[in-house]
Amino acid sequence: MTKTILLADDDSAIRTVLTQALSRAGFTVRATATATALWRWVMDGEGDAIVTDVVLPDENAFDVIPRIKKVRPHLPVIVMSAQNTIMTAITAAERGAYDYLAKPFDLAALVQTVTRALAEPARTPAARPPGQGQEQLPIVGRSPAMQEIYRVIARLTQTDLTALIIGESGTGKELVARALHDYGKRRKGTFVAVNMAAIPRELIESELFGHEKGAFTGAAARLAGRFEQAEGGTLFLDEIGDMPLEAQTRLLRVLQQGEYTSVGGGTPIKTNVRIIAATHRDLRKLIAQGSFREDLFFRLNVVPLRLPALRERLEDMPDLIQHFLARAAAEGLPRKAIAPDAVERLKAYRWPGNVRELENLIKRLTAMEVEETITAATVERELAASPQVENLPLTAGAAAAASIGEFLENHLARYFAGYGGTLPPEGLYERILAEIEPPLLRASLTATHGNQLRAADLLGINRNTLRTKLKERNIRSIRGLGSA
């Protein structure tokens, strides 16, 4: 029997295009421009699925969906919207929508979504009242990459599943974790964040699981760990790749059995905490190196969520800039505008520090620029004055990267050619590495003012690995900088 789709959109051109696409897929389509007609069809028992825009001339679809779910709970509702923000996706999920599609979208994606909705067993979505505070979350972007992130976040807020957030430093992993908590089932509980890379390795187990009085030298009193602090809420384990193996074993027990023991304690403690982990590192490589447990990886990786780097969503740059300008003004910095050519110059940078780096730059620009409008010349001047390598422009950065690669390739080709096509001498790899690695290490320390934790993060390696390499290369300090 042919399935009927109820379509609501106030744009006649969109109704025509969607009707044609759904009809070609074998569906019968009833289309309208109003929520009133849609509601009448629902009450008459018509339709097997609904596709509706959020903003209709007579009523917002988000106000209609709960009524639809009350009278026909198994009728799937697919929401379309040009207001492509994370709150649109979250609100759609909260009101009980089957799925959310951001305009513009591929027609094939719509047909696939409708087909999937009709094929799944009838179910009642876990619609619930909106989460606390409907203010705009500080996750900004309308790019396709971010729209997919929004959809995953919206679905995850309806569950209590463990999630693993993967992304480069500065991409907003903690913001996503907070969104999952603030708009999820545990929003009334506590959100506790802990960065594995910022805690001495010998103290991580005590920090997470707490310790008893006298458990070790200096343990003068009982200490509640982060698991105890997050009871009933969410524990965000940032940079999980830096967790020592001993602590990994303890964490695995929590995920498997829902209990742990404090350091120096003998009685298992039951826990009810949602765990969200994050990392900028390749955990599979760490597994191959023997520094990360494979069984823990699979326990954490129930729902993987990869955050795109800023260079992968440059179309979001204008929205991000305006967001950070408004935030800077709200924090008491001068209110500034930004010229179009300045936006284009910002788009031309590589942004290794991602969104965090962009926010810091915008704050500096609003604080230092005397004019009301930030220009491209101001941007160039500020970047040129910055000591950080993250602020190299894409044009220069790309050229530099290309010149390094070309330099090595060309000179090594000539170097190898000197051997008449024969194999290079034994140990050549180590010899070249020994010449390249020291300046790389020194440059990273210079860029981070001698901060080894930040330098390791910049290079994408573990801090202990960096210390080992510094020792191997006999690099003690950089231009008088410390080695913190």
Image (cartoon, grey):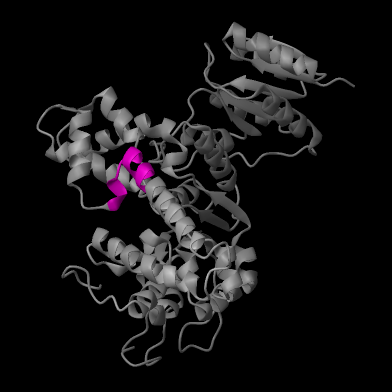
Nearer to us in this view, 167 or 412: 412
Residue 31 falls in image quadrant: top right
Q: Identify the residue at horizontal 26%, vertical 38% (top origin).
A: 327
Quarter placement of the N terminus: top right
Residue 20 covered by magenta stretch: no
Residue 329 visible here: no
Q: Position of residue 335 (x, y in %)?
A: 17, 31
Task: Look at the picture and state if 471 lies above or below 118.
Answer: below
Q: Is residue 457 left or right of residue 59?
A: left
Rendering coords of residue 5 (x, y %): 74, 19
Q: Which residues are magenta?
A: 389-400
Asked whether residue 153 appears in the rendered view, the answer is yes
Relative to residue 481, is residue 312 drawn left or right? right
Give percent across and percent down for residue 228.
Answer: 45, 71
Q: Position of residue 262 (x, y in %)?
A: 47, 82
Residue at 71% x, 33% y is 73
> Toward which corner of the image does residue 214 lie, by quadrant?
bottom left
In magenta segment, residue 397:
yes
In this view, 355 is above or below 321: below
